[in-house]
């Protein structure tokens, strides 16, 4: 997956370089080419493709926190044995 990302960014970088060095091109056009054809679509696609991984990490963190605190109350543990009541 990341190989496709690197290849796409290479192609877009080459497009931006050609835009910047062209006789009718400009640096602003090269910058817009890089952002509009490269960064913007790639950031959206990577966000969508990495959604399952983010969900898996969030579930693992929730499972780890519930394992550390079994009752989920967040309180300090009390005495394991109740005190014995003495008769007067």
Image (tube, rainbow, N blue to C red):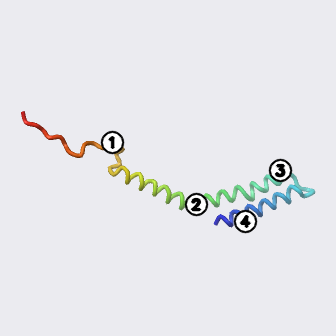
Cα gap from disc 2 to disc 1, whole angstroms: 37 Å
Element type at mark 1: loop
Q: Read off the residue under disc 1.
A: 76
Q: Is residue 34 left or right of residue 68?
A: right
Label 1 packing within 10 angstroms: few (<14), some (14-19), many (20+): few
Q: Read off the residue under disc 4.
A: 7
**Circle 4 or circle 1, nearest the eye:** 1
Cα gap from disc 4 to disc 1, whole angstroms: 53 Å
**Circle 2 or circle 3, nearest the eye:** 2
What residue is shown at x 73% (from left), y 58% (from top)? 38
Along the line of sight, the residue nearer the viewer: 9 or 29: 9
Q: Quadrant of residue 40?
A: bottom right
Q: Position of residue 1 (x, y in %)?
A: 64, 66
Element type at mark 4: helix
4 up-or-down from 27: above or below: below
Cα gap from disc 2 to disc 4, whole angstroms: 18 Å
Label 4 packing within 10 angstroms: few (<14), some (14-19), many (20+): few
Element type at mark 2: loop
* Disc 2 + disc 1, Cβ < 8 Å: no
**Circle 3 or circle 1, nearest the eye:** 1
Q: Read off the residue under disc 3.
A: 28
What residue is shown at x 75% (from left), y 56% (from top)? 36
What residue is shown at x 86% (from left), y 55% (from top)? 20
Q: Earlier in the sequence, mark 2 or mark 1?
A: 2
Which label was assigned to residue 66?
none
Q: Read off the residue under disc 2.
A: 50
**Circle 2 or circle 4, nearest the eye:** 4
Q: Earlier in the sequence, mark 3 or mark 4?
A: 4
Q: Quadrant of residue 16?
A: bottom right
What residue is shown at x 43% (from left), y 54% (from top)? 62
């Amino acid at each position: 997956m990341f190989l496709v990302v690197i290849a796409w960014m290479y192609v877009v970088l080459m497009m931006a370089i050609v835009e910047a060095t062209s006789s009718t091109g400009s640096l602003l056009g090269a910058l817009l080419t890089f952002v509009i054809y490269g960064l913007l679509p790639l950031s959206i696609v990577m966000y969508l493709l990495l959604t399952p991984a983010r969900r898996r990490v969030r579930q693992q963190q929730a499972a780890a926190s519930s394992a550390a605190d079994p009752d989920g109350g967040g309180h300090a543990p009390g005495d394991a044995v109740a005190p014995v009541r003495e008769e007067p």
